[in-house]
Image (cartoon, grey):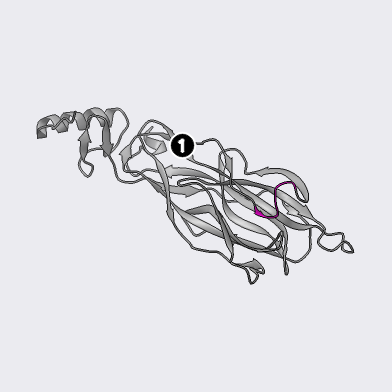
Amino acid sequence: MHLFLRASARRGLGALLGAAGIQGALGCNTITGVDALRFEPCAPSFTESTPTAAQGSDGGSAFEDDCPEGQVLVGLRGGVNGDVVSGISGLCGVVQVSETYPFAVTITPGTAMLGVHGVMSSEEPEARMCPPNEMVVGFSGSTFLYDPGNPRPILLRVSLLCAPVLVDGTAAAPALSLGEATGTPSLGGADGQGDSFEPIHCPENQVARVLQGRSGLLVDALALGCAELSLSCPWAPAASEE
């Protein structure tokens, strides 16, 4: 049931919300009902990224591709030559926050493709995407010796680990956490092929914004750059006001 308030009642409710710490909840914001308040959108912000451990070898040349501001890694596009990942590129998505409380974090299409590393091959490149509204938080896979005469392993297959961002807390002080992580189907060789490595995770409560590693004709190594996501809400009290 929706409740429509007269101006005097709205002013009274605005004072009450202000006392509760929700600054600017009325005026430029619209009351839509007793169970949902509409606010100016919160803006996502990120800490500086830190690299995860890499898997592979020191062959080829180093690469490091950052998603644009406000975007996160949500998938990979890669070439497959036989059973080998022959080329790889990151796919980014835009982080958006709902205008209604309780807040939800969603992902919309962003940068279609970062730089290409390795060779996409003559076969049709394949994409591996996180589920809707989830972002990359790690990866797993395997390596192998492409050339027995060369002791440097290369990437054989890779699977992304993805998770949603959950918003808890109050409207005045939203708190973020990660939901349960799930894996995408592998890109490259079949599961069980090569030397499997333990899953590589971003640090706790961090998400991937950078695809990095090493490549030549093939993908020699892979890692992620991860950062902590937070929300900057225009109506929330500043630290000096708390």
How far across and how far down the image is residue 117, in percent? 65, 66
Count of number-bearing discs: 1
Q: Left or right: 180 with respect to 219?
A: left
- Seen from the viewer's position, the closer of residues 93 and 150 is 150
Identity of the residue drawn at 58% across and 60% down = 126
Q: Which residues are magenta?
A: 187-192
Q: Quadrant of the C terminus?
A: top left
User: Magenta stretch containing residue 189, yes or no?
Assistant: yes
Q: Left or right: 37 with respect to 216?
A: left
How far across and how far down the image is residue 109, in percent? 44, 57
Query: Which kind of residue does numbered mark 1 sit on?
Result: Leu
- Residue 134 visible somewhere in the drawing: yes
Residue denoted by label 1: 166
Q: Quadrant of the N terminus?
A: top left
How far across and how far down the image is residue 101, in percent? 32, 36
Main SS of residues in magenta? loop
- Seen from the viewer's position, the closer of residues 166 and 120 is 120
Q: Left or right: 43 with respect to 189?
A: left
Instruction: Give above or below for 143 relative to 241.
Output: below
